[in-house]
Amino acid sequence: MNKLLQKLKDYMLFTPTSDENKFYLKSQSSQAEYDVRDEKTDGTEKDVVFTDIEENLAYVKKRFSYPLNNDIVIREIKMKEGRRAFLVFIDGMVSSEIVDLAIIKTLFELPYFSEGEIYKYETEIIDRFIAHSQATFTESMDTVFEEINFGSCAVFVDGFSKSFLLDVRDWGHRSIDKPENEQSIYGPQEAFAEMLRNNTALVRKIIKSEKLIAEGVKIGNVSQTRGVMLYISDIANPNLVNEVRRRINGINMDYVISIEEVSMMMEEETFSATTHFLETERPDRVARALTEGRVALILNGSPNVLIMPTNIFELTHAVSDDYLRVPYANMIRIIRLIALLFSILLPALYLAITLFHQEIIPTYLLYSISASRESVPFPSLIELLLMDLSFEMIREAGLRMPGPIGSTLGIVGGIILGQAAVSAKIVSPIMIIIIAITGIGSFATADYSLSWSFRILRLIFIALASIMGFYGIAIGIFIYALMLASQKSFGVPFLSPTLRMRSKSMANAVFVNPIWRKEKRPDFLKTQKINEEPDISRKWKIKKKY
């Protein structure tokens, strides 16, 4: 009970701070409270490579359930003078041509190994004979199986207590295509795919700097899903990098399939209607975020990338804003904000006006609304919920159907259903208009996850408007604003930069600034380098004195 009262107090009461610098990324230890990578085996299985090749072969077959696992390939070979070796890889995940030419062929050409020759040293196999650019060795069997499962080839040689790992990955993957969810007429037309290294290469192609760090991470005790944490070392706040690393290392689950699961494991407010991550499929957006001092997470197998931290304003920004001239971009942002308000509040406002505040409606419009609803058998609330539910069903059905059929279903289904409902006098024509404008406003939302939160908020505001009219809507806005003010995204207040109205970052939060006026990086990120460009970035504007 005390915790509930304290939670309500935190939401309802504002505690001013005496120092604005308290709103900064707090220092966090990079050591996770629980790091799954520190777990040790129980010792029942040997984790080191054996010297005897028969023991290694038996152990590998046991771990991979060979030959029951028919995509596991174990190729035994005899080198010169009869020394035995074998290769292990997964069929379909490696390049057979590289395995044949760069590994098997070179192993056949190795000279005889004897104690009196230089080739008795184990590293000589990869130092002088295996013709492959990425070759390493390890003494850990767990590392061997982890690399094989990720598409590498392991080589075991009789008499050596090491396994040689070669990166020969070549599995099928989707090629780089245009963005589907974040389309823009201007700017690059490339989108992330599911291949980890292809995605990091897309970012490095834009940011050509050795300061761009791609720190490897592994998530999932069993799946060992690989990813990279991207940041620019001399710009990003070290506390932010440590906090992101701490949360990633603290994820304890067996299988991780997608980056959306990682975001749900890292978020602070699970039941918040608004996400605390910016998810994108565009490399140019990730590159721009990194240059501002943010951190990005790319996961193998996921075509989307997480950007941390974010705030409520950035979720309403579109990619095209950065490529349009200032007047055009500001006009689009105003239209988008109006659409945002319509998608949340328009049904609730209509309900509040028709039920409680009819006096603010012009007389002739009131007569028109009353006449259109004269034969409708349902109250306004039931009528509104019925049409809103129908619209959501059409939208969901359109997503589940194939592309051409889905778009046709959305348009034709909406027209036919609306016309039939009006003809049958189930709903009024004005209600069809309200739902249509609301739906168009939700489609104009820049971030897809944000449109989900607006759909939830719309139902809450409808309920409040049906009970208390404008007062209920005002109370709902007040409570929602308090909830947003109490939330943080990786140490950054979610309403930044409104906490400091004099902040230069506030100018770009709602409207677009000219690119030559973006001298400072967002101050709420507390970056190592504040200036993004000099005070005078257009030197051709300087008037010379003759």
Image: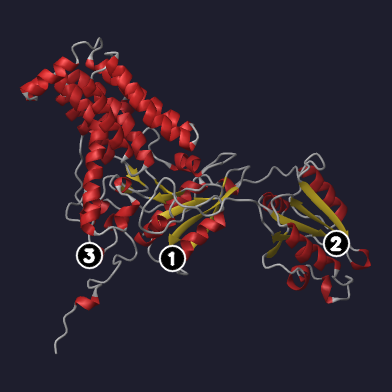
Q: Position of residue 511 (x, y in %)?
A: 22, 52
What residue type is disc 2 on?
Gly
Task: Identify the mark nearer the N-term, 2 or 3.
Answer: 2
Q: Is residue 536 above or below residue 386?
A: below
Q: Secondary structure at mark 3?
A: helix
Sequence-earlier tag: 1 or 2? 2
Residue placed under numbered mark 1 in the picture: 207
The quarter of the rendered structure image containing the N terminus is top left
Q: CA distance from mark 1 to mark 3?
A: 21 Å
At a point 37% along the width and 50% down the height, the residue shown is 309
Say what amino acid the circle numbered 1 marks.
Ile
The three-letter amino acid code for the residue at tag 3 is: Arg
Element assignment for label 1: loop
Q: Residues within 10 Å of mark 3 (few under 14, many from 20)?
A: few
Question: Observer-nearest residue: 277 or 70?
Answer: 70
Along the line of sight, the residue nearer the viewer: 412 or 183: 412
